[in-house]
Amino acid sequence: MTGKGSSENDEKLNRQILRYLVEHPDAKDTVDGVIKWWLSEDLAGRGRKTVQEGLDMLVSKGWLTRRDVTSSEKIYGVMKDRLGEIEKFLRGK
């Protein structure tokens, strides 16, 4: 797969995470829960590492929160005060 294809897939994954959270703003879950509940089968099959990277990128943008439960387990959720910005981003493409 080319770098461009990978980048497009990563954007699709990130958009699906954001759409889920716009529809379910109280949702919070671990990486494994995100894979199981928030993503379609084709995107869930992208692998734990790719999903983790997508979540971390969305945290770095300030759109998601991350709470460390243990050194290896983190829980993700949406920054509710950024929902308007997220919705605008999702409408943009």
Image (cartoon, rainbow, N blue to C red):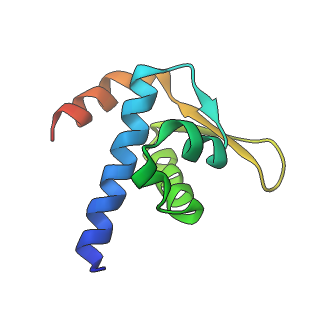
Tell whether 89 sits left or right of 18: left
Extreme residue in the front direction: 41
- From this view, report whether residue 22 is shown above or below residue 47: above
Tell me residue 76's x, y (percent): 61, 38
**Depth check, front residue: 17 or 88:** 17
User: Looking at the rendering, in which quadrant would you find the C terminus?
Assistant: top left
User: Looking at the rendering, in which quadrant would you find the N terminus?
Assistant: bottom left
**Depth check, front residue: 81 or 14:** 14
Q: Which residue is pictured at 42% across the width and 44% down the height?
A: 40
Extreme residue in the left direction: 93
- From this view, report whether residue 66 is shown above or below residue 77: below
Tell whether 42 sits left or right of 76: left
Tell whether 67 sits left or right of 69: left
Q: How many marks?
A: 0
Tell whether 87 sits left or right of 14: left
Q: Which residue is pictured at 40% across the width and 54% down the height?
A: 42
Q: Which residue is pictured at 53% across the width and 53% down the height?
A: 56
- From this view, report whether residue 48 is shown above or below residue 36: below
Q: Which residue is pictured at 18% across the width and 31% down the height?
A: 91
**Depth check, front residue: 57 or 31:** 31
